[in-house]
Image: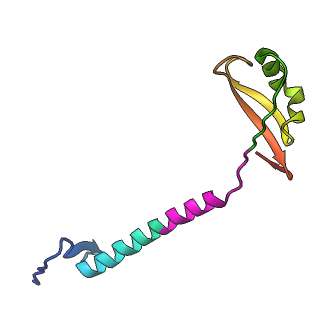
Amino acid sequence: MQRFTGNTLLTFLIYFENDQILIIEGERIMKILKLILGLLVGLALVFFAVGSFAPRLLMKTKIEVNASVEKAWTIFTDESRMGDWLMVFESMETISGNPGEVGSKYRMIFVENGRKW
């Protein structure tokens, strides 16, 4: 019987394979753990890099209107006219709530260069 001693927490790992006892020493365990950690860090970096370069849709506009807030909001939320100020607007549908009410949610579809957003 061989006795294992060491000054690290991961001195050895014993496992069974085909009715044989196989022993992996702490140094090999650390190499395996470093490899797994490296792969996880690499995957995380790839994930964030893809997110950084993925196209985003950002639209800003500022228009001063000589009308009441109610009238301006009614015109702004009129789906038939949204293409007048949102050039890539295609359609809009209500997801929840009643159209035009506070708290209602919408799904808006935009098309730019043949790609839907």
Whether residue 28 is situated above or below residue 116 in the rendered picture: below
Query: Residue 113's spot in the image, x, y percent?
Result: 86, 53
Placement of 42 over or under 20, stated as above or below: above
Q: Quadrant of the C terminus?
A: top right
Question: Depth check: 39 or 69 in front?
Answer: 69
> Residue 64, located in which quarter of the rendered image?
top right
Label the magenta part by its dominant secondary structure: helix
Position of 89 with respect to 3 (left or right) is right
Q: Magenta part of the protein: which range?
A: 42-58
The residue sitting at 87% across, 41% down in the picture is: 87
Question: In this orientation, which residue lies closer to the viewer: 96 or 79?
Answer: 79
Provide residue 32's location: percent of width, then percent of height: 35, 75
Q: How is the image coloured?
A: rainbow
Residue 25 visible in this rendered orientation of the protein: no
Q: Position of residue 17 (x, y in %)?
A: 30, 74
What residue sits 30% from the left and 80% below the top? 28
Question: Is residue 60 visible in this depiction of the protein?
Answer: yes
Side of 99 relative to 34 (left or right): right
Which residue occupies the foreground of this view, 18 or 27? Answer: 27
* Relative height, residue 73 to residue 52 (above, below): above
Tell me which corner region of the image, top left, top right, bottom left or bottom right, holds residue 61.
top right
Question: Is residue 57 a member of the stretch shown in magenta?
Answer: yes
**Residue at point 56% right, 60% down?**
48
